Image: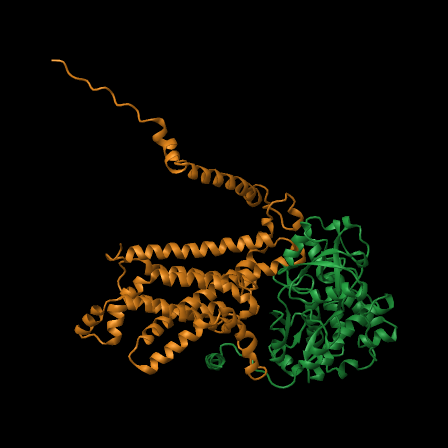
Amino acid sequence: MKFTKSTLAVTAAFAAIGLSTQAQAGATLDAVVNKGFVQCGVSDGLPGFSYTDASGQYRGIDVDVCRAVAAAVFGDANKVRFSPLTAKERFTALQSGEVDILSRNTTWTSSRDAGMGLNFAGVNYYDGQGFLVSKRLGVKSARELDGAAVCTQSGTTTELNLSDYFRANGMKYTPVNFDKSDETVKALEAGRCDVLTSDQSQLYAQRIKLAKPDDYMVLPEVISKEPLGPVVRQGDDEWFNIVRWTLFAMINAEELGVTSKNVEQEAKDSKKPDVRRLLGADGEYGKDLKLPKDWAVQIVKQVGNYGEAFERNVGMESELKIARGQNALWNKGGLQYAPPVR
Amino acid sequence: MSTHTFKPDLQPPVMSVGVLGWLRANLFSNWFNTLLTLLAIYLIWIVVPPILRWVILDADWSGSTRADCTSGGACWVFIKVRFAQFMYGFYPAELRWRVDLTVLLAIVGAAPLFIRAMPGKLRYGLLFLLAYPLLAYWLLHGGFFGLAEVQTSQWGGLMLTLVIAVVGIGGAMPLGVLLALGRRSDMPAIRVICVTFIEFWRGVPLITVLFMSSVMLPLFLPEHVTIDKLLRALLAVMLFEAAYIAEVVRGGLQAIPKGQYEAAAAMGLGYWRSMGLVILPQALKLVIPGIVNTFIALFKDTSLVIIIGLFDLFNSIHQATVDPAWLGFATEGYVFAAAVFWIFCFGMSRYSMRLERRLHTGHKR
């Protein structure tokens, strides 16, 4: 291990000069409060989830989770710094303390939750693998895809899910593999395959890249479970609770009809006990979380409730136009459900 | 007395002079060349017009959203809207003058070095090389002497590419020369250290070095001690390229005849003076093409930092292509990246040719 040692020595020497170290001590919340911002690991570029707009601002549904945590802790959603992470380095960055939260379309699986010293704080997007087909094909369901040529990105779990699905349903298919998602789109357009498969959230982004997006549709079937959510280090329950309840506050706010527009009014005037408890008008629920009394008010005011964040980043108000589907609230046919604040 | 008048010369045959003659001699001299010429014309005919149409004739130049890109050609609006980000990354807009000033200072400061007969050039050069990096660090990073701090995570675009390339080149060059000298040293300890260093860094791909620095290194450090990502990348690039430069320079050292070493010793020069005054000036001059080759490769390799999540020019462009407002314009972005990289690499290559011509002292064949 000569390399690591020598590099260590050199980098340690630089670090000692104090060029750019950030030494932190104690629990995550104390460290975050001390340094004055939340360090958040996001994707290095995924439409709707984490990307930068023309003015250099980070945007996306994953980015909003971090902004909401900053709003809860500091009362200021802008006290957050982002570290763009690649898929390979994301867990190291979290484990080593480089970031406080990892909010980077990461699938919640048993091996990651239990085997890697991580805790998933919840699910901010229920994703799953789907199919994008040309409307010309006249296919209405994935069950009718027997014998189709399917474009996939090689080396991902989508290949495995695809073969499982076709085998389970006794259908045949021809795989057409590519390295990059852009190539799969071009191949679908050129007619080299009949179907393109990827996570549904990505299919909508790829549809925009087609010359005539309206000629293509995403089939309703979802053939795998990909619950995506924010992740924190195991062993700091205090911080885990904050991130988890920040997400729950956004979902609860949507369920209770609290939006960024009416939240201040509701906090003052609402008669509903649920709303009053969430917004800190009744009780001291913020204190249990070691957060200010108005934590949920700040989240909803500055970032919005879950529905607002969804529509703004990936839903009908965005270019992606993803339907709520599984991400609708539990009382509207979806899976998003948050325990009550009381 | 009759004077003899010569008949006027006949015009040479039309087919052997002028454009026609040139065409015949060079393009249609036999059936094979004719075939190749026709094939080449056909290829140009099918390739160039569509490219021209896409790049210029059908392209959209004005506007500010994707809705303005309707004509079917390239959508340069995308580049225009994102241009500042491609140049500066996330550097705060109101502080971008600091980047501009840094570049300006580099140009103004280095200009005297290009004047051939400037007195005290060596001293000025050394002073510049020592003072400029500190000044540039102060301007770009700030955080002391009255300038607000700009975290390196906000650096990006062409500016970051240049920072990596310049620091890489600036650090690798002296280190490489020292390594090359060390490898030819008579002292076994120094020789072994240099050989090990060079062979180690030449033996691993840059991409794994970068990857190790960002994925493995943090695991060996205590929790909550983080070393700046850019600093890790800079060190990795610098050490890696130093090994290559060392081997290029060693090639030059070996080409210097033994008589030169002996002559320098006979003049009473010690090791450092004989190297600095006699051997290295000749050796480095010989290996200019090799050194510039390495630098051009380094400049292009900077785009590898994409795998550790640094936003250099290439990654900034990649990042812009995933903005939902601009999905589907990746081609324009990559063409732009290629153009910028080409301009810089071509510039370096032309400068090295000029340098070679100026420094040539009769070895040219």
Whether residue A213 appears in this view of the structure is yes
The number of numbered badges drawn on the structure is 0
**Image coordinates for residue A166, horizontal then vertical, percent:** 77, 63
B338 or A186, which lies in front?
A186
Q: Quadrant of residue A316?
A: bottom right
Farthest residue to the bottom: give it: A26
B153 or A159, which lies in front?
A159
Residue B64 position (above or below residue B237): above
Residue located at (65% from left, 47% from top): B68
**Image coordinates for residue B349, horizontal then vertical, percent:** 39, 56
Q: The chain drawn green is chain what?
A: A
Q: Colour of chain B?
A: orange
A98 or B100, which lies in front?
A98
Residue A143 position (above or below residue B185): above
| Residue A296 as seen in the image, left or right of residue B127 | right
Q: Quadrant of residue B241?
A: bottom left
Q: State the scheme by which the image is colored.
A: by chain
Residue located at (43% from left, 39% from top): B32
Of the 4 image quadrants, the one containing the C terminus of chain A is: bottom right
**Image coordinates for residue B17, horizontal then vertical, percent:** 34, 31
**Image coordinates for residue A90, horizontal then vertical, percent:** 62, 73
Whether residue B150 appears in this view of the structure is no
Farthest residue to the left: give it: B1
| Residue A184 as seen in the image, left or right of residue A264 | left
